[in-house]
Image (cartoon, coloured by chain):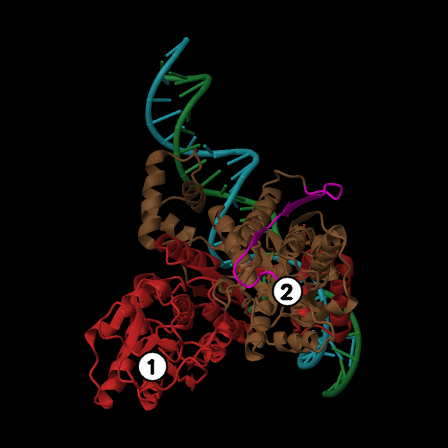
Chain colours: A brown, B red, C cyan, D green
Amino acid sequence: MAITIKDIARITGVSHSTVSRALGGNSLISEATTTRIRKVAREMGYQPSAAARSLKTNQTKVIGVIVNSIDDPFFSEILFGIEDAAQQAGYSLFIAASQYDPIREQNIVQTMMEQRTDGVIICSSSFSADKGRQLLANGFPVVVVNYKANENFNYSIYHDDVDGSQQLTEHLLALGHTKIAYLGNSKSGRTSLDRLNGFKKEMCKAGVKINPAYIYEVEGSEPELGKESLHYFMNLSDRPTAIMCFNDMLAIGFLHACRQACLRVPEDLSVTGFDNITFSAYTSPPLTTLDQPKYSIGNESAQLLLALLGNKIENQNNTHKEKVLKGSLLVRSSTSVPLPNE
Amino acid sequence: MAITIKDIARITGVSHSTVSRALGGNSLISEATTTRIRKVAREMGYQPSAAARSLKTNQTKVIGVIVNSIDDPFFSEILFGIEDAAQQAGYSLFIAASQYDPIREQNIVQTMMEQRTDGVIICSSSFSADKGRQLLANGFPVVVVNYKANENFNYSIYHDDVDGSQQLTEHLLALGHTKIAYLGNSKSGRTSLDRLNGFKKEMCKAGVKINPAYIYEVEGSEPELGKESLHYFMNLSDRPTAIMCFNDMLAIGFLHACRQACLRVPEDLSVTGFDNITFSAYTSPPLTTLDQPKYSIGNESAQLLLALLGNKIENQNNTHKEKVLKGSLLVRSSTSVPLPNE
DNA sequence: AGACCTTCTGCACACGTGTGCAGTTGCTTT
DNA sequence: AAAGCAACTGCACACGTGTGCAGAAGGTCT
């Protein structure tokens, strides 16, 4: 059994309220007794019970974070940004992974509610909107990150995927490509759509028509799916000269499939990714991608939530605050001028 | 303010104790009132307060997990295994990353103690032993995973790194290599030493002498460090024909450096990794490595802890339980017969 | 009809912490 | 010396939940 303020009270010969106040730094208690009590507390290795404290104060100093899966390097970096901000403000993280599983999602929501998390950050693009609304309905401050249905939430941080995709498209167009294809991920809904739209927008701006067969989707972003995609594109009678992949994971699998098929990148085919995860710098060839400010996204989302908790921003239904962050083009070696004979 | 059992009591016209019992499934309460109360609770969206409950029951149904960093793909997969086991048993995870920072480590320990986590899993090889002992001293059940100082703890799960390293060495020896080098990571202490020892052991068994210059260490396992290492090995007058890297991350960086230096792998140099992280299958060439059962390691560690919590195993100072898991050699394309002219 | 048992429910306290209010102590002032 | 004041501390209750014990209600048996 852990020791309590009552134990300290007994030993120092004061009441437990005095101990509580002394440890809390209340100026009512004399400096002498305060230091004495603190010393004893330290010596006894006293640790306040978070449960008892939050029961009384009605706040837990814990913020919940919902992600798709923990072992996705993209989310990991966002988490890192969140953790930094939280830690600094004295908050801890309660992390849960939905794994695309509705049952887990429900469990997570329930756990967050039972734990009385002070707030929740949803950075799972696949997390169902009604589950999120359940949290809102129960009065939880919620910040969504890169969320497909952010119009349902008042506070959101997201990356400008349309703009990012335009940057990549512009890069490929500038190199001289016109036969550009887009490899999407149907599972990530809105995000993939935004990137597709950015592509379309820029192509339209440049007056280049898109071959409908050049838009292809797979279900997920595991590198393994790259092989299937390459097969599809190579079977087209009129092959594209550049492929824009939904994200780096997919691009990495795609590059791998190219190597196996003895297709040279970028000579035979230019390939781009999206996100700039760590490993995209170490592929062969190193991947041209869009550097998404993952750390900042995480950090800012946490800061927004913390501001909400500190009532620095009113959490009302009529306020609506969103922050859009832009990424930057990162040209490596997987893109080049298309072959002249094509 | 969330609704409580008292609210339900008021509405159903019974006392709060009856509600508590009804929801808890106590057989003392008549079936009729039980169903009636449960129905009201469901309709009102009642969620029990974890804080109040744990204050009373003295258990939180939360287990703490300490890792080096969240954005390390190796730990991510272990986490995945832990999460599965925990979730199934109705436990939630409290995850904290030490980031190799002593101050953070102290904060983490304190937070775990304040939160009264039911138990703690330490899978951070760098986590300082005295911090861990602090948890033990306060009565927390602790399971360590791949921990450098596991002799200090009663319960541990670890991977047999010596054996794994022997398997890799045996593979290289069988291919005909004798000039084999080891690239270690000084930051991960024991783990790196074990792998080095496995290498030495197997070389000794085969009667092959190790050139002392072939043992080199870097500080960390960021891929970026691969470049420095290659530089070192290539400057040796008598170059090795095979390099065993501490882990996949390092190997991936090393492979990248080889490509930049126009060294062919495996023709000019065989390279091996360790861990089998997802991306090791997508390098160029695909990496020969040791497949460490990461999911199982995580899963078993959680199960061990859960058994401890359920008192299925006595948590005493004299009991000592450890489980050793072995990995398996995974031959891909980064290793081959050494060049005859060397 | 009264005694007894069964079945159900409420009272009251506990867990560890925080806080308004009243009370105590010791000192200064008149 | 009495009154007043400042400085400090303790009492008692609250937060939401769980549980031993007593008590109430209803039924059965002698």
Instruction: Please give left or right for residue A18 compared with residue B47 in the image.
Output: left
Q: Does the rendering let one see residue B152?
A: no
User: As shown in the figure, which amino acid type bears the numbered disc 1?
Assistant: Ser
Can you say whether A308 is above or below A195 in the image? Answer: above
| Number of residues whose C-alpha sits closer than 10 Å to that of mark 2, classed few (under 14), some (14–19) or many (20 or more) | few
Distance between the alpha carbons at the discs numbered 2 and 1: 49 Å
Can you say whether C3 is above or below A338 in the image? Answer: below
- Give the labeled residue for mark 2: A340
Does residue A327 show up magenta in the picture? Answer: yes
Q: Residue furthest front?
A: A341
Can you say whether B173 is above or below C16 in the image? Answer: below
User: As shown in the figure, which amino acid type bears the numbered disc 2?
Assistant: Pro
Report the disc number at residue B165: 1
- Image x and y of residue A177, in percent: 66, 60
- Image x and y of residue A237, in percent: 74, 75
Residue in the picture at 41% in, 41% down: A22
The span shown in magenta is A315-340
The quadrant in which the C terminus of chain B is found is: bottom left
